[in-house]
Image (cartoon, rainbow, N blue to C red):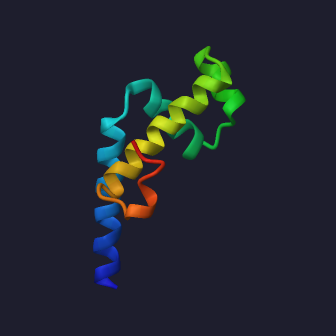
Amino acid sequence: MIYFALKNRQLIRKLEQALRLMAPRDRVIFLGHFVEEATFFELARQHGISVAEVEAALRRGLEIVADVLEPDPPRRWRFWRR
């Protein structure tokens, strides 16, 4: 049980680190979609941008999260990483 709690704390710290690394607008869009469950269309309207720009912001955010959670991914995953 304690091991599980420690793993959760480590995961939360890593996610906080990833959020700090994101550009401010990307962070707001990322949290809006994944925490507040806003749709792409709602986020685009709120920020005055296109849906494609929302998708790009989410992609950048997910890349940062992936890099922080697993900085050295298995070889088979490297084809889609930066």
Position of 66 relative to 23 (above/below): below
Position of 27 relative to 52 (above/below): below
Position of 65 relative to 27 (above/below): below
Q: Is residue 61 left or right of residue 5?
A: right
- Which of 51 and 11 lies nearest the eye of the viewer? 51
**Residue displayed at 60% across by 32% down:** 55
Instruction: Locate residue 9, reporting x and y percent.
Output: 30, 64
Q: Is residue 26 left or right of residue 72?
A: right
Which quarter of the rendering shows the N terminus? bottom left
Q: Is residue 33 left or right of residue 14?
A: right
Q: How many marks?
A: 0
Position of 5 relative to 12 (above/below): below
Q: Residue furthest bottom?
A: 1
Q: Quadrant of residue 70?
A: bottom left
**Residue displayed at 43% across by 43% down:** 63
Which quarter of the rendering shows the C terminus? top left
Q: Quadrant of residue 23?
A: top left
- Which of 45 and 78 lies nearest the eye of the viewer? 78
**Residue displayed at 45% across by 39% down:** 61
Instruction: Locate residue 27, reporting x and y percent.
Output: 44, 33
**Residue displayed at 62% across by 21% down:** 46
- Which of 59 and 4 lies nearest the eye of the viewer? 59
Instruction: Locate residue 3, reporting x and y percent.
Output: 29, 81
Instruction: Locate residue 33, reporting x and y percent.
Output: 59, 40
